[in-house]
Amino acid sequence: MGDRSLLRVALCLTLHTSWMLSAATSGVPRAVDIVLPCMHVLMEDAGGRGGLGGMSFSREEVTLLIRNVTVTGEGGELDPITDYQPSKDTKTTIFQATVTSSPLPFADRLLHADCEGLDISCELSPLSPSGLLYITHIRLPEFSITMVTRTEPTNGMEEDPIGQDHLLSDKSIISMTVDLCLSSSTPSQLTPLSLDVSLNCELSGDPEGVQAEWHLQKEGKGERLFPEEGSRVTMEPGALSGRGDASLTIRAVRVQDEGTYICAVTLGEHRVHQILQLQVREPPRVTIIQTEGPELTLTCSSDCYYPLDVEFSWLLRGEQITHADPVTSSHRRNSDGTYNLSIHLRVPTPPTGALPDTYTCTVSHASLPEPITVTTSVPLPEVSSGALGYIISSLIVLITTAFMFRSRDGVREAREGGR
Ligand SMILES: *[C@@H]1O[C@H](CO)[C@@H](O)[C@H](O)[C@H]1NC(C)=O
Ligand SMILES: *[C@@H]1O[C@H](CO)[C@@H](O)[C@H](O)[C@H]1NC(C)=O
């Protein structure tokens, strides 16, 4: 834990500059180091160690140091500019990945993410049994990056073959270069129905000879998607011919489109992927109707919303109702996958001479930042409503008369003005 907070300080202060022109100038590209706490995940044959189904996972905290990351930055001085030096008390293994060709996607945002306290998940594991290729998944709420890196076989590793056991020994530095990156700016999206949605998936590096495909997983089943020109689901044109953009577009989103999308890129014998979550959040339409009967019933309906969970409450003149028990209907599902739900409340007629009762129905739903409130007034009983009717019509007469006078004055003024 202490190591992690040290690391955060290190990341926020340690910026290495190789071609900086002026620290105070904004928009000037410069190369920096990015330091991230990461998890080294190893899946191995348990053998004698006894694991589940013969395989076991080991997880170990490591430090990921990404060197030569080009950022442009906006304003603000980047104060202490030094090379990243692993401190003496850094106990973790350092994986040092150098960006040599195409720039790292989302570099600026990644640089500031840790200082801003964003939730970063970083996992690193060997891609091939030889341990020459590593794969790193960096995931934040707003973007995700998968890097394939190649280790440099000679780097001070003594005779220890690069791969497994050295991790458990003393601190070591493993140097690698970044071969390619697959990234997404939409790792998890919420969308209302009927909108067009883009699931972003881009490859940087050498997209030559790359195959990209999409899979959708939901309710425990997976299917391959076949995006087609002119259909509802399309892929960026040129995705397979080396431009590196394999983004998927879904037109007029439906409830069925919700799920986990996998953008899988095959490069030779290697396969890397991005996992994207798409969730539908359709807000309810809320209405209240009053039904006359032996007693008056108020029905508050929440229609055409998704997903299922919704919360109602009734207020009388702004106060929670405790004396009456509202009855909730069962969910009704519409053909488009959305739901309807209503809640009924029987209300007493207010006594003669009282003020009309104002009832408010409040609906909370995952799609709503604030609950929706709808208010209705229960009409007064006949006698007083007759009286009220009289008052209202008198008011109307008064207002009309006043208005007529005013407009006649207005006409006169206009005539005088015209002369
Ligand atoms: C740093 O990255 C740039 C491209 O982003 C590349 O041209 C340059 O050679 C790299 N430098 C090193 C030392 O790898
Ligand atoms: C749900 O509510 C909408 C709008 O009020 C209505 O058109 C639709 O018929 C209702 N669906 C069901 C299944 O009751």
Image: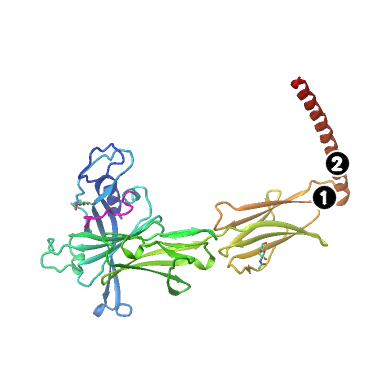
Q: Residue 229: tell me if it is visible.
A: yes
Which residue lies under the disc numbered 2? 393
Q: Which residue is drawn at 68% across and 62% down?
A: 343
The answer to whether 361 appears left or right of 18 in the picture is: right
The answer to whether 192 appears left or right of 12 in the picture is: right
* Residue 272 placement (x, y as % from top left): 31, 67
Q: Residue at x 40, y 56 (%)?
A: 141
3D distance between C-alphas at marks 2 and 1: 17 Å
Which residue lies under the disc numbered 1? 380
For ligand 2, tell me if the residue under mark 2 lies within 8 Å: no
For ligand 2, tell me if the residue under mark 1 lies within 8 Å: no
Q: Residue 122: tell me if it is visible.
A: no
* Residue 94 placement (x, y as % from top left): 21, 58
Residue 118 belongs to the span the image colors magenta? no
Magenta stretch: give its range: 96-108
* Residue 123 placement (x, y as % from top left): 31, 62
User: Three-letter amino acid code at disc 2?
Assistant: Ser
Q: Nearer the viewer, residue 228 or 344?
A: 228
